[in-house]
Structure formats: structure tokens, C-alpha cells
Image: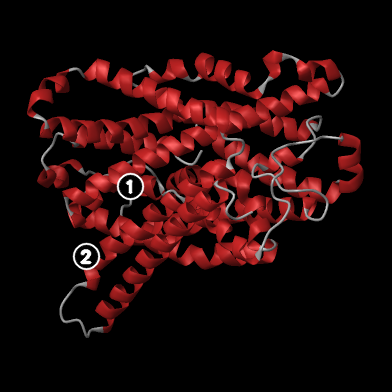
């Protein structure tokens, strides 16, 4: 999903490159094996994911599908620009990962900040995956209880129980593995699930009589929270869109793995990759919004708006469960790599703890277990994915806008003489990127706090 095969590559590159000298990357960074077409698919694979489910919800809070599309299209030039800036910096400094590019341009302190952001972002995405699993299993079991009403009162169909059992049986075993490269080959499930959803949602809009459909379904879903909005709620749509388009962490290894590694070829990759993402997100967001607007409240997971007995949607639910089940270990591996790097830096600062650096196996197992239990605990008590995507969508804005803006500022915006138009353009663009990203992050965190404490409805 939001970080699949190339995120796994990113983590491996970080792990292998962390012990080497920073000036030796030029010797390491060789031509990759990916063609332009393959690179386009990998960009799409890295961007499409769990954020797709929330696009109709985001369009609702934007004020409608027209406003939602307008916000999306207004952010796209900056999203594309930041991808090209990262690729340019990677080529200039011959660095194979997002963190190493930031460190080469901005220094080690900024690298530590990026590692912390990556760890928090991956952890939040893992929580989102577990919530999605719980929601889809709940809806599937509801399909059986539709014909057997006593089933819904059974303890073993409770959402918290099903999430816990499923996670321990089908996710935790993967986390103990030192190498999970086999899971990278399941990444096509994410693209397939998203493509299927983007087809089902528009088709359902044209063939469904929604009032009759909802009346026949008689489905009561406590997750349908999007019932009222105010003019200020338009800002809530932005973090969801950022979360959907965040492929920037993976963008550097995608670029460095290309056979034709130059900005012209990569521009074609970005253009076609983002175009496919725009099509999928726009179809799902627009027709998901049009289907249920005026008929019922909106769930932050559009599949929860549909009846549990809808076979076409149940297929999508099953595909999503398989997809996030294999995506969770990959995201955990990436996040754990960042966490372990931070832990190692802290151990280096503590003289009495330096002996713990050799406890590699034990340290990684403890980190994996704490990661799993923490994400599971949050997923059990967070009722819907909106509560998680809202803040980490703001964090995604730092990868899309803030860090690329700082890189652009360092590379071009501070050149002398300042009166050259290229320098002024780079300076203005970099400042704009930083301001946009900072605003989205601050707004999403503030909005989340106000929502959680019921200060705003």
C-alpha cells in the first residue's frame, strides 16, 4: 500500500549504507535495473493505499466533489516539484535514500529529525492498517449476522477480539523475521485492491438506487461520523489528500534504481505515476461522495458505507485484508529501522550503555514486540481511521513539502548573487513549500486535538 516494495528497498539501503562512510556513496550508487514503465508502476504502488478509502470523506469535508478536486489539483504542482527536487539532490550527492539525501544537504541533526518523523509515520500507518482489518472483518461478520441475528451478540465477533486474534496469528509471526523480502512480491495486492475499489465505487453510483439500497440493507454503522460540517472543516480534507500522495520517502530509491537515471526520464515517470494516482483518487472520491451525499453520513472508510451483504464490496474487503496483512510487516520493518538507528545514537551517547549495542537480536525483538503491542492497543480503542490519518497526514506534509523545501533552499535559494531571477524563484518556491507544509502539519495536529477533546464538533 502507502509504502510497499520500494519502502522495503529504502530500509535495506539505510541499513546497509549506515555503516559506510558518507563520501563513499558515489562508488556505491550504480545504475539500477528498473525501466521507465517499471518505475511508473512502483511510484503508483508507493502512493496508492489506505488513503484511498478516506477520499470521499475528505471530499465531503472539502465542501463537495468540485472543491475536493480543486484542493487536490492545487497541491499537485508542489507534490510533483518536491519529487523532482529529491531526485536532483540524490543525483547531485549520489545518495540512495531519503534520509541520506537530507543528511547530505542539511546535516546530521536534520537526519535525526527525519528518522523520528519516519518512525512516527510508519507507526501511525500500522495502526491504520489494524483498524482497517478490524473494520473489514466486522463488516464481513455482519453479513453473516444479517441472516442470523443472534450471531452479532456473540463475544467472538466483537471487533476488539477479532483484531487481536487476527494480529497475533497472521501479523506478529512476520515481525520476528530478520528478512521479509518475500513480502515485497505481494505489493501488487495493494494496487489491485485500489484499482478494484476505484472501479466498484463509480459502478455502484450508476447502478444503485441509494435510498432503496440503504433501506433494504438496514445497516447501522457507528463509524458514520461525517454528518455535519462547517466552513472551517475544509482544512480537514488536506491531511487526507497528503496521506494519499505520500510516496516521497520511497521516491529516492525509485529514482536511483532506474536504468535511465536522469531528471528527464524521471519527470516522465512522475508525470504518468501521479496521473494514474489522480485518476484513481478522483474516481473514488467523486463517486463515493455523490453516491451517499444527502442520503447518509460519511465514514472515513468508504467501504463501511456499503451494505455488508454486498458481494462486490465484500470482495474489496477481502482484498484489503490480505493487502494490509502483508503491508504491516513492511511498514514495521521500515519504522523499526528508523527506531533502531535512533536507539543506536542514544546508546553511543551513553558510555555505560555501549555494551548493549552488541545485543542486536534481543534489541530488535524487543523493538518489534513493543511496536506491535503499541499499535494493537491503539487500534483497539481508536474507532475509525480518520483519527489516525488526520495527524499522520499532517506529518506526511513534512516529507512532501517541508524537507524538500529546505533542500531546495539550501541548493538554490541561498546562492549569491541574490538578485538573479533563478535564485529569487528558488528562494520564493522553497519558502512557499516550507510554509505550506508547516501550516498543514500545525493545522492537522491542532485540529486533531480540538476534535478529540470535543472543543469543536
- The chosen color scheme is secondary structure
- For numbered disc 1, what is the local secondary structure? loop
Image spot of residue 338 (x, y percent) = 29, 36
Image quadrant assignment for residue 357 = top left
Q: Can residue 180 be seen at all in this image of the molecule?
A: no
Q: Give the number of callouts.
A: 2
Q: Position of 435 compared to 99: left or right? A: right
Image spot of residue 343 (x, y percent) = 23, 31
At x 74%, y 35%, the residue is: 313
Image spot of residue 17 (x, y percent) = 20, 37
Image quadrant assignment for residue 25 = top left
Which residue is at the front of the view, 45 or 33?
Answer: 45
| Vertical position of residue 199 compared to residue 424: above or below | above
* Of pointers 1 and 2, the one earlier in the residue sequence: 1
- Checking the image for residue 410, the label placed there is 2
The 10 Å Cα crowd at callout 2, few under 14, some 14 to 19, many 20 or more, is some
At x 70%, y 18%, the residue is: 157
Q: Position of 84 compared to 199: left or right? A: left
- For numbered disc 2, what is the local secondary structure? helix
| Callout in the foreground (1, 2) | 2
Q: Position of 90 compared to 52: left or right? A: left
Which residue is at the front of the view, 189 or 454?
Answer: 454
At x 43%, y 58%, the residue is: 442
Image spot of residue 29 (x, y percent) = 21, 44
Quickly name the residue at label 1.
259
Amino acid at each position: 500500500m502507502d509504502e510497499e516494495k520500494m519502502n522495503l528497498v529504502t530500509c535495506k539501503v539505510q541499513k546497509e549504507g549506515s555503516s559506510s562512510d558518507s563520501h563513499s556513496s558515489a562508488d556505491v550508487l550504480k545504475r539500477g535495473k528498473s525501466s521507465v514503465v517499471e518505475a511508473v508502476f512502483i511510484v503508483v504502488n508507493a502512493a496508492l493505499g489506505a488513503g484511498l478509502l478516506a477520499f470521499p470523506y475528505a471530499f465531503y469535508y472539502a465542501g463537495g466533489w468540485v472543491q475536493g478536486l480543486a484542493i487536490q489539483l492545487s497541491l499537485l504542482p508542489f507534490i510533483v516539484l518536491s519529487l523532482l527536487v529529491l531526485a536532483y539532490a540524490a543525483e547531485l550527492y549520489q545518495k540512495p535514500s531519503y534520509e541520506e539525501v537530507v543528511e547530505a544537504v542539511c546535516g546530521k541533526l536534520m537526519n535525526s529529525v527525519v528518522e523520528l518523523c519516519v518512525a512516527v509515520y510508519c507507526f501511525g500507518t500500522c495502526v491504520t492498517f489494524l483498524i482497517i482489518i478490524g473494520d473489514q472483518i466486522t463488516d464481513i461478520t455482519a453479513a453473516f449476522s444479517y441472516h442470523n441475528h443472534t450471531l452479532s451478540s456473540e463475544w467472538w465477533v466483537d471487533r476488539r477480539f477479532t483484531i487481536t486474534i487476527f494480529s497475533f496469528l497472521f501479523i506478529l509471526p512476520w515481525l520476528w523475521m530478520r528478512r521479509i523480502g518475500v513480502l515485497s512480491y505481494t505489493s501488487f495486492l495493494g494496487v489491485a485492491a485500489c484499482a478494484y475499489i476505484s472501479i466498484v465505487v463509480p459502478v455502484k453510483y450508476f447502478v444503485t438506487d441509494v435510498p432503496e439500497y440503504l433501506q433494504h440493507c438496514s445497516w447501522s454503522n457507528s463509524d458514520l461520523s461525517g454528518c455535519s460540517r462547517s466552513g472551517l472543516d475544509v482544512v480537514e480534507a488536506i491531511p487526507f489528500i497528503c496521506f494519499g500522495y505520500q510516496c516521497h520517502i520511497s521516491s529516492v530509491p525509485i529514482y536511483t534504481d532506474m536504468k535511465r537515471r536522469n531528471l528527464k526520464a524521471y519527470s516522465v515517470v512522475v508525470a504518468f505515476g501521479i496521473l494514474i494516482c489522480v485518476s484513481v483518487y478522483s474516481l473514488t472520491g467523486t463517486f463515493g461522495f455523490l453516491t451517499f451525499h444527502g442520503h447518509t453520513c460519511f465514514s472515513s472508510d468508504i467501504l463501511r458505507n456499503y451494505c455488508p451483504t454486498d458481494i462486490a464490496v465484500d470482495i474489496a474487503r477481502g482484498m484489503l485484508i490480505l493487502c494490509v496483512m502483508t503491508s504491516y510487516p513492511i511498514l514495521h520493518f521500515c519504522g523499526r529501522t528508523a527506531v533502531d538507528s535512533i536507539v543506536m545514537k542514544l546508546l553511543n551517547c551513553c558510555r555505560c550503555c555501549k555494551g548493549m549495542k552488541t545485543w542486536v537480536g534481543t534489541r530488535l525483538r524487543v523493538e518489534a514486540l513493543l511496536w506491535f503491542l503499541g499499535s494493537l492497543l491503539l487500534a483497539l480503542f481508536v474507532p475509525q481511521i480518520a483519527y489516525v490519518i488526520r495527524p499522520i497526514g499532517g506529518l506526511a506534509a513534512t516529507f512532501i513539502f517541508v524537507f524538500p523545501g529546505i533542500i531546495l533552499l539550501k541548493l538554490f535559494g541561498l546562492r549569491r548573487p541574490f538578485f538573479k531571477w533563478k535564485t529569487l524563484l528558488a528562494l520564493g518556491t522553497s519558502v512557499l513549500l516550507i510554509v505550506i507544509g508547516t501550516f498543514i502539519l500545525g493545522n492537522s495536529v491542532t485540529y486533531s486535538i480540538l476534535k478529540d477533546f470535543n472543543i469543536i464538533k
